[in-house]
Amino acid sequence: MTAIVDHRSGAPRRSAAQLVHGLLSMPAGAILLVFVVVQLACIIAGLLFPDDFRYLSPQNMGIMMRSVPVLGCLALGAGLLMIAGEFDLSIGSVYTFTAVVMAVLVGNGIDAFIAAPIGLMIGAAIGLLNGALTLRFNLPSFIVTLGGLLFWRGAVLLFNGAVQVRFDPNPVFNEMFSGTILGINAAFVWFILLCLVFWALLHRHRFGNHVFATGGNRSAATAIGVNTNRIKLAAFAIAGFMAAFAGILATTRVGSVQPGQGAGLELQAIAACVIGGLSLRGGRGSILGVFLGVMLIFTITDVLLLMRAPGFYLDMFIATLIVLASIFNHGLDRRGASI
């Protein structure tokens, strides 16, 4: 009789442990668990203290949806490149440079539906240039794109000086990127759609298999016929393209672009990817992890703002979260290597 009671009382505990273990073994399992816990805590606090902690207010949700897409788009491009085994530190400067070019073109009378694709092509071309230099001269992408960060930051000043550029597109373009779609912020809808596209590309397409193979073991990928140089070039181009797209979203939302507005965004994008479970060595990660990493950063930012905490608290918390995520990811890498 006692054995039956022990068995029944132990079953839920083992099931819960198995569920947690199963979540942690998923590419984005750990960040999903953390994100759910944080969201539950915020929702409960918002219900208990609706006047002091306005997390669930429509105004706060609207601010979140307007804030997430820019960093989210940067992180999608940076994340795909990280899975391929490379980094791009220039995406923040490319984001600003392409936005300035687009705004200047529109200011000179060119339609936004022409200026925006030009900006996207410039972003992709810069990404290709980064990839070509990295692969042609066998240089660390960290060094190449660090040079790109400084070069394109200076190019912004050379192109238009240290002045704000107004962006006044036609109403249709403005509605497409900063309006609302079924009551949801258009930029957030774009971000969700791009997440779905990247998910299909990375997890349901042969290209994604090649990206994981290239980042995981380049020699083995080459041995089975994968053109790793082409994969890396494509990943660099996509990162540049997404940086330019983020510039379109930000510039349309604000109606102007500042010369230094992209400074530091490249580090935040990489931080979101690391927090989301992407390996710094390449070959492991998921689009869900990137999405949750971005959302967690903005959730913590929002919580600190609602609590009126000093801004440096956010930097301290994100720094701690990055280190902990890196330690956890390193442990997964070692465990994967030992299997």
Image (cartoon, rainbow, N blue to C red):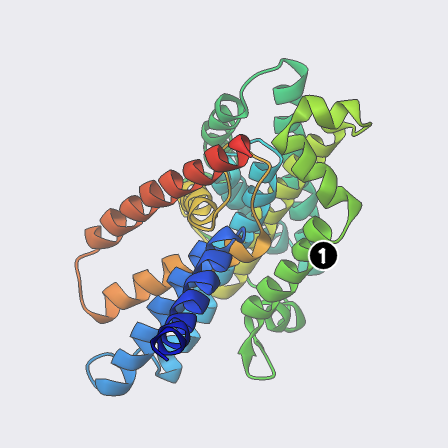
Q: Hey, which residue is sitting farthest front in the picture?
A: 1
**Relative to residue 26, is residue 39 depicted above or below?**
below
* Total marks placed: 1
Q: Residues within 10 Å of mark 1 (few under 14, many from 20)?
A: some
Q: Position of residue 14 (x, y in %)?
A: 42, 65
Look at the image and tell me in which quarter the C terminus lies: top right
- Taking depth in this image into account, of 151 and 181 the one nearest to the observer is 181
Q: Position of residue 26 (x, y in %)?
A: 53, 53
Identified at 66% across, 47% down, the residue is 120
- Taking depth in this image into account, of 188 and 180 the one nearest to the observer is 188
Q: Hey, which residue is sitting farthest top in the picture?
A: 137
Left of 237 or right of it: where is 226? Answer: right
Q: Residue beneath label 1, please? A: 200
Identify the element where label 1 is drawn: helix
**Relative to residue 1, is residue 240 depicted above or below?**
above
Identified at 75% across, 30% down, the residue is 230
- Taking depth in this image into account, of 80 and 183 the one nearest to the observer is 80
Left of 323 or right of it: where is 140? Answer: right
Amino acid type of disc 1?
Answer: Ala
Look at the image and tell me in which quarter the N terminus lies: bottom left
**Residue 150: quadrant of the picture:** top left
- Taking depth in this image into account, of 212 and 163 the one nearest to the observer is 212
Q: Is residue 324 visible?
A: yes
**Relative to residue 76, is residue 234 depicted above or below?**
above
Q: Is residue 169 visible?
A: no
Q: Position of residue 89 (x, y in %)?
A: 48, 34
